[in-house]
Structures are given as C-alpha cells and as structure tokens.
Amino acid sequence: MRAIDDIHTTAIRYGKWANEGHGLGYPAIEPFLKEAEKWHHGIPVLDDDTALKINACTIKMRAVTPELFQAFMLRFVSGKSINQICQEMDVSDGTVKKYIYAALQSLKLLLTENQCIFIA
C-alpha cells in the first residue's frame, strides 16, 4: 500500500481528514476534535478509504492498548505537543514518545500486513 510508506505523514493526513469534518460521527474521534489545534498546514487530506481503514485500526488499538490510542489521537487528531500530552496523560516525555512510536509502528504493520503488535 503505497500511501502507507511514510506512516508519520499518513498519521498527520489522518488527523487533517478528521479535523476537516470527516471525523464527525465517529465516536472514537469526536472527543479529540473538541480541543484540536489547526497545525496541518500544506498537508493534503487523506482519502476516505484509507482514513476509514486507519479509523478501524485505531478502534482495535483503543481496545488493546488505550494508552497508545490516547497518545496517537492527542498527537495527530488534537495536534497537541509532546509536552501537552505528557501533562494530560501524566507520564514522562520518553513514555509519550514511546507510545507514539509504538502506535505508529503498530498501525503501519496492521495496515500493510494485517498484523498487530500493540506493545509499549
């Protein structure tokens, strides 16, 4: 899947997709839209098919490792900084970075190989 080669950019594009009104009606996304900061300048929106696949993966992530889900959504949908996420989750910046890295790698593996490793 060519669109998933750069998972970090794909995650940013997913956040932009969610923020441009596409995330409305998706209960897993809506809480993170309330505090979303507009920070996705110049990045194209993800296509609906890929965004919906990512949404399905994040729902699996939330069920298995809610902390990865929360860190991912706060970073890429709400657009929060690492420091803001640390404060909200009450963990260190190293832990937040580990959560985001694990979430991105797990998401990429799930999207490309249909396998999941949600470990942090």
Image: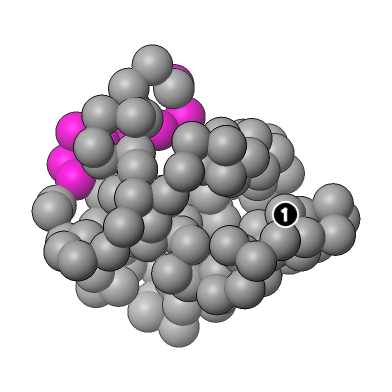
Span of residues in magenta? 27-36
Predominant secondary structure in magenta? Answer: loop
Compared with 40, 37 (above or below) is above
Report the side of 49 relative to 33 (left or right). right
Of 37 and 1, the residue lying toward us: 1
Report the side of 11 relative to 12 (left or right). right
Q: Residue furthest top?
A: 25
Q: Look at the image and tell me whether residue 18 can be seen.
A: yes
Compared with 9, 17 (above or below) is above
Compared with 46, 26 (above or below) is above
Q: Residue at x 44, y 22 (%)?
A: 26
Q: Residue at x 56, y 56 (%)?
A: 68
Report the side of 8 relative to 101 (left or right). left
Q: Residue at x 46, y 43 (%)?
A: 47
| x then y, percent, for residue 67 | 54, 53
* Tag 1 residue: 111
| x then y, percent, for residue 58 | 59, 43
| Residue 31: in magenta span | yes
Of 84 and 53, the residue lying toward us: 53
Q: Residue furthest bottom?
A: 94
Question: Mark 1: which amino acid?
Answer: Leu
